[in-house]
Amino acid sequence: MMMRGLMIGVALTALAACETGSGAARSFDDPAVQKLYNLRTPEYFATMQVASVVARNCARYSFDTALEFEVNEKRNEVGRGTLSANGLRDAIDMETDVTQRSFAAKHGVDLTGGDLCAAADAETAEGSALSALLAPA
């Protein structure tokens, strides 16, 4: 079920990136973007899910759909993007659960609601892969 939602989200992201014509907030050469690009496929999709939740729960950041589209296209070229995700459904679901709990414990937050700006700021300061997907609003 989570995988179906993820695939729909990726498709909507692709459409949004095409329609807005806006570029990504960060360059593909940015170290945080490179961390995102180099994640294993389950980690990549888990990171996208958590970044999306963080962006929805912090007014200072938005989810960078243009960057996500660009990185996913480059990952597809090497067999690690959405095109490779179907066979990894269970691994992605498991990794998403682990990533969500790890993020919550690391930052002392609840991902089911509330203000996640302090956690987003900490990820950005760290230059994490997740922070690559958070664009200043």
Image (cartoon, rainbow, N blue to C red):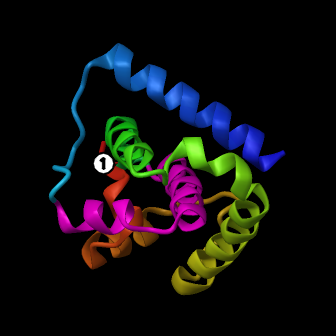
Total labels: the figure holds 1
Q: Is residue 17 left or right of residue 12?
A: left
Q: Quadrant of the N terminus?
A: top right
Q: Is residue 26 left or right of residue 38?
A: left
Residue 4 on image: x %, y %:
76, 39
Write the residue at 56% across / 43% down: 82
Q: Quadrant of the C terminus?
A: top left
- What residue span does the magenta drawing correspond to? 30-58
**Is residue 67 shown above or below 45?**
above
Residue 123 on image: x %, y %:
37, 72
Residue 75 on image: x %, y %:
40, 50
The residue positioned farthest toward the front in the image shown? 78
Magenta stretch: dominant secondary structure: helix
Q: Amino acid at mark 1?
A: Ala
Q: Can you identify the residue that label 1 sits on?
A: 135
Q: Nearer the viewer, residue 55 or 99?
A: 99
Write the residue at 65% across / 37% down: 7
Give the quarter of the image for residue 11.
top right
Q: Nearer the viewer, residue 133 or 14?
A: 14
